Amino acid sequence: MTGHTQREVRCGNCRRLLAKGEAIDLTIKCPRCGCMNHVRGTTPGTEGQRASKETSHGPTD
Ligand SMILES: [Zn+2]
């Protein structure tokens, strides 16, 4: 089994396929509609850790 699935990067405006694979931090311009797409990659394993900083609403003195 190949557990490596390539992620598809699509234009947020016209859904054109722009790239395939892993993107850490990428800005790509759609050649079709000219829309700038900002892509931030999520690596499997780090997704579960992002909830830790959002729960910082404590009672403020
Ligand atoms: Zn587009």
Image (cartoon, rainbow, N blue to C red):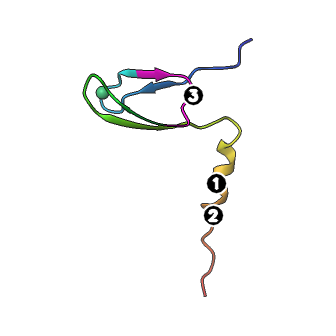
The label nearer to you, 3 versus 1, is 3
> How far across and how far down the image is residue 60, in percent?
60, 83
Residue ID at (30%, 32%): 13
Q: Is residue 33 left or right of residue 9?
A: left
Dot 3: few (<14), some (14–19), or many (≥20) neighbours within 10 Å?
some
Q: Which residue is mark 1?
A: 51
Tell me the quadrant of the picture where the N terminus can be found. Answer: top right
Dot 1: few (<14), some (14–19), or many (≥20) neighbours within 10 Å?
few
Disc with the residue nearer the chain's start (3 vs 2): 3
Q: Which residue is mark 2?
A: 55
Q: State the CA–CA distance, disc 3 to disc 1.
A: 22 Å
Quarter of the rendering containing residue 11: top left
The label nearer to you, 3 versus 2, is 3
Q: Is residue 11 above or below residue 6?
A: below
Q: Which residue is mark 3?
A: 22
Tag shown at residue 38:
none
Range of magenta residues: 18-25
Q: Nearer the viewer, residue 58 or 27?
A: 27
> How far across and how far down the image is residue 39, in percent?
46, 37
Quarter of the rendering containing residue 57: bottom right
Residue at the right extreme of this rendering:
1
Residue at the left extreme of this rendering:
33
Q: Are marks 1 and 2 in contact (CB under 8 Å)?
A: yes
Q: Secondary structure at mark 1?
A: helix
Q: Amino acid at mark 2?
A: Thr
Residue ID at (46%, 26%): 9
Residue ID at (64%, 36%): 43
The quarter of the image that holds ligand 1 is top left
Q: Amino acid at mark 3?
A: Glu
Q: Are marks 3 and 2 in contact (CB under 8 Å)?
A: no
Q: Are marks 3 and 1 in contact (CB under 8 Å)?
A: no
